[in-house]
Image (cartoon, rainbow, N blue to C red):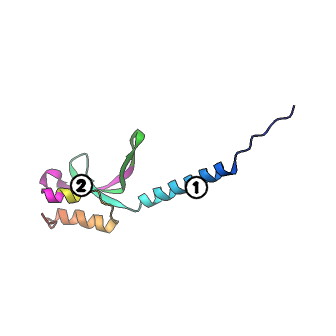
Amino acid sequence: ERKRRRRIPGGLIAAVIALAIVLSAGFIASRAVYFVGVGTDGFVTLYRGVPWELPFGLDLYEEVYSSGVSDAQLTERQRATITDHGLRSREDADDLVRQLELGRLRS
């Protein structure tokens, strides 16, 4: 009896490699963006990553800085700006939180 070897189709291998490249690139890109939101403690928080959560509790973001400004202190306009979860550069996100902390963010 001869053993039969199973061959894995080249297209399947190429598809798996392409998927791994896309997922890796997406992960790396998500580490380069920031957003501002309100943390579970109710304070304005700076996050790195994208504001998405995957199944099984996997977050695509991490907390970088929690300010001393609570959600309750925000005007409706400030709250809309803070909770829009727009993706920003680190400098832009830092500036937004700094302006809020200094009371310079337009009401």
Question: Magenta span has 6?
Answer: no
Tell me which numbered mark, 2 or 1, is placed earlier along the sequence.
Answer: 1
Other residues around mark 1 within 10 Å, as few (<14) / some (14–19) / many (≥20): few
Image-based side of 22 in relation to 59, left or right? right
- Where in the figure is residue 97, as x and y percent of width and height? 23, 62
Measuring from the top left, give residue 1's x and y in whole percent: 87, 31
The one of 38 and 64 positioned closer to us in this rendering: 38
What type is the residue that disc 1 sits on? Ala
Closer-to-camera residue (47/83): 83
- In the rendered structure, does residue 73 fall within the stretch colored magenta? yes
- Residue type at numbered disc 2: Thr
**Would residue 21 appear left or right of 84 to someone viewing this image?**
right
Name the mark on residue 18. Answer: 1
Based on the displayed image, in which of its 4 quarters is residue 50 positioned?
bottom left
**Residue shown at the point (14%, 66%) measured from the top left:** 106
Q: Nearer the viewer, mark 2 or mark 1?
A: 1
Quarter holding the C terminus is bottom left
Comparing 6 with 20, the one in front is 6
Instruction: Give the magenta-colored segment's residue range.
Output: 60-78
Residue at figure coordinates x 36%, y 57% from the top left: 48
- Kindly check if marks 2 and 1 are in contact, taking CB atoms under 8 A apart as contact: no
The residue lying at 20 percent from left, 48 percent from top is 42
The spot of residue 45 in percent (x, y) is 26, 55
Indicate the position of residue 66 as horizontal and vertical percent values: 26, 54
Q: Quadrant of residue 75?
A: bottom left
Q: Local crowd at mark 2 within 10 Å, few (<14), some, or many (≥20)? A: some
Give the CA separation, mark 2 to mark 1. 34 Å
Which residue is located at x 23 percent, y 46 percent? 41
- Which secondary structure, mark 2? loop
On screen, residue 93 versus residue 31, left or right, reads left
Q: Residue furthest right?
A: 1
Disc 2 target residue: 83
